[in-house]
Amino acid sequence: MSKKDLPKDAQYKGTRDVVIQDINFNLNNTKFIIHKYYSPFLGKVF
């Protein structure tokens, strides 16, 4: 989702870390930083 797809009243509410662990022959961790926005009008988080 792009910022341009958000409602006009969407408010930035910080980030959250998501770590996905894949185990093959080696340990492989991937960290994603996900930005959250909240629309009070829609009562919805994006």
Image: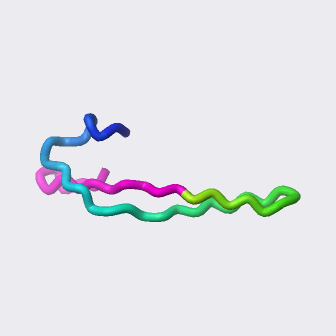
Q: Residue at x 24, y 41 (%)?
A: 6
Q: Position of residue 43 (x, y in %)?
A: 18, 56
Q: Is residue 46 above or below residue 19?
A: above
Give the quarter of the image for residue 20.
bottom right
Q: Residue at x 83, y 56 (%)?
A: 24
Q: Position of residue 21 (x, y in %)?
A: 68, 62
Is residue 18 shown in magenta? Answer: no
Q: Main secondary structure of the magenta part?
A: strand
Q: Residue at x 37, y 54 (%)?
A: 35
Asked whether 43 or 11 is in front, the reply is: 11
Q: Is residue 7 above or below residue 33?
A: above
Q: Position of residue 31 (x, y in %)?
A: 57, 59
Q: Is residue 19 above or below residue 11?
A: below
Task: Please state, as top left, top right, bottom left or bottom right, where the N terminus lies in the image.
Answer: top left
Instruction: Please give left or right for residue 16 compared with residue 39 in the image.
Output: right
> How was this image coloured?
rainbow
Give the quarter of the image for residue 12.
bottom left
Q: Residue at x 52, y 56 (%)?
A: 32
Q: Position of residue 13 (x, y in %)?
A: 27, 61
Asked whether 7 or 15 is in front, the reply is: 15
Q: Which residues are magenta?
A: 32-46
Direction top: furthest residue: 4
